[in-house]
Amino acid sequence: MQHSSTAPPRASSRQMRWSNLQRRWAPYVFISPFFVLFLAFGLYPTLFSLYMSFQSWSQTDGWGHWKFVGLENYSFTLTDPMFWRAMYNTLWLGVVSGLPQHLLAIPLAFVIHMGLSRFKTFVSAVYFLPYITSTVAVALIFSTLFSTQKGVINQTIAYLNTLPLFGWFLPDENINWFLNSTIKWGIALVVVWKYTGWNTLLYLSAIQAIPRELYEAASVDGATRWQQFRFVTLPLLRPMMFFAVSLTIIGNMQLFEEPFVLLNGGASSATQGGQTVAMYMFRTAFEWLEMGTAASIAWILFAFIAVLTIINNLAFGRAAQGRGE
Amino acid sequence: MALQAPKPTAGRNLGGSLARLSGYGLLLLGGLVTLAPFYFMFVFATHERSEIFGSPPPLWFGGDLATNYQILLQKIPFWRAYWNNVYLALVVTLCNLFFCSLAGYAFAMYEFRGRNQLFAFVQATLLIPAILNLIPFYLVMTQLDRAMDPLANAFAGTFLGRIHLFDWIDTPKALWLPGMAGAIGIFMMRQYIASAIPRDLIDAARIDGCSEFGIYWRIVLPLVRPVLGTLGLITFIGSWNRFADVAVILRSQETQTLPVVLRTLQGATDVEWGAIMAGTALLVAPLLLLFVFAARQLMEGLTSGALKS
């Protein structure tokens, strides 16, 4: 009798201990895949590239034959005119393709939000479409559209030229988009086309979060649409502007696929005019097989991104936080 | 009691509707510019090269789709590359859904030591630029097996000698395995689970004797279906479009994905633009279809709390 009454509690206490143990360790087990993967394929390669940037090594040397060269890779990169040309291109593209995205996206989001009710999702989906499309596909499509002799874009410009008003500010001759001087404009056009919809979506989400009453109060006070946009929407969008501009800076500084495909991998004559730092790094590593130098380029680019992010933070972030609260 | 909305005057009304009209005009023009490249892609896919660059350019579908398709199949292993795309995207997506929801659940519902620090760490990994990783990642994937050769030789004949941990050149696992769990996915899942699933439900299941994994599998997973959909779409699209790392890691045509293989067509002396456009259209089509059916879910998922901190 006594025996049977003590047995169940003992069994259940063992069970309790097991479930307590399970409960204590479960969260660590559940989150471990990410950390294991990150250590192996994220952190390790990153640290490795730091090590590499102080070494001279080419794939033909064989794995064990690393040679410590100190800061040589960095001094080579920082005195290489081609690197600075690529950096100039990258910064130029960053501004010329980055700014219009936001200048277009903010009014677009405002018009979509204020002017449309039923077709809101449909219209913003149309604008979002380029963003989900493969960059390689996009660049290939634009390669045909940009064609010098009979490309659609040149033919459209030529047609618009025959209309009275447009002839004023449009070029008379076909634009050769693949020249050193023009290719940057082509790349910028593709980037603006691809990412404006993404920014529109970001701004739309922020505008939707603005309470309707604010607009109602403004319109009771007699504010026009423009005034509502200027004095209600814009100030409240500042936190999102900070976020979206940060993403644009980080993305544009690493611009690779658009110029790479438009320039046919760097083989064309326009290479110098459209080559970005990321592309230059790629070629240093896989065309000229200078892995150490390429690693130093990556870290210099990283430093530039960090500095720009900090500047953006100082210019925008504090103001955004102040107003956002 | 003078608080009364001023009556809109006729002039303001006219101004308002003018603004409205110009707003619609702007939207329409922007929409046309956005869609035009897609339209030309599909149109060009049905024309041969000489017609694509004719004057005026073809504005309507032609009859050369079959020819372009044939050229495509001749020049590249098209369907093989297509399958590689499908395989990579599906594996990455399924793994991400599982591991990210599991980790997101742990971060949202468990109290454990170091939780906040570990979560901050997850978020911080997002700040590392992808480009920084490309070269060392390539080296790790292609060279480390050679680096481990001495080790393998030392243990030749034993179990240890047969491990080829990093012999991953030209294998798709070099691409999907490192990407099995991502910080964005974990972040999305944690936000959603913390706000949508009541803690009582978890406790009740625990009292009923459900195991910890069982709670996740049988209770949490079915409840996070909406955000699984959004994360699945994002991951699938992102993986479908991968280019730089695939081009670097997968060197043989047998394993390469479609964007990489299509790009090689561009290098030929006589570029078959019609065939390239046919291939591009087939590359983009599944995404367009997916988007038509899931646009609402994707866009709402992206703009709702999920991605905003």
Image (tube, coloured by chain):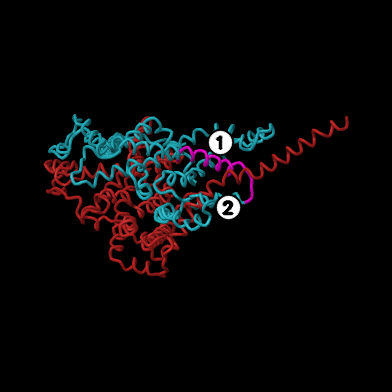
Chain colours: A red, B cyan
Residue B22 horizontal side relative to residue A304, left or right: left
Q: As shown in the figure, which amino acid type bears the numbered disc 2?
A: Gln
Residue A279 on the magenta segment? no
Residue B72 horizontal side relative to residue A172, left or right: right
The image's mark for residue B117 is 2
Is A171 located above or below residue A291 in the figure? above
The image's mark for residue B48 is none
| Residue A127 coordinates in the image, percent (x, y) | 33, 38
Measured Cα–Cα span from mark 1 to mark 2:
23 Å
Residue at the location (28% across, 50% down)? A188
Residue at the location (37% across, 39% down)? B85
Label 2 crowd bin: few (<14), some (14–19), many (20+), radius 10 Å: few
Q: Point out the tag, 1 or 2, that comes first from the N-terminus.
A: 2
| Residue B274 coordinates in the image, percent (x, y) | 21, 37
Q: Is residue B3 visible?
A: no
Residue B95 on the magenta segment? yes
- Indicate the secondary structure of the residue bearing disc 2: helix
Q: As shown in the figure, which amino acid type bears the numbered disc 1?
A: Ala
* Residue bounds of the magenta highlight: B92-113
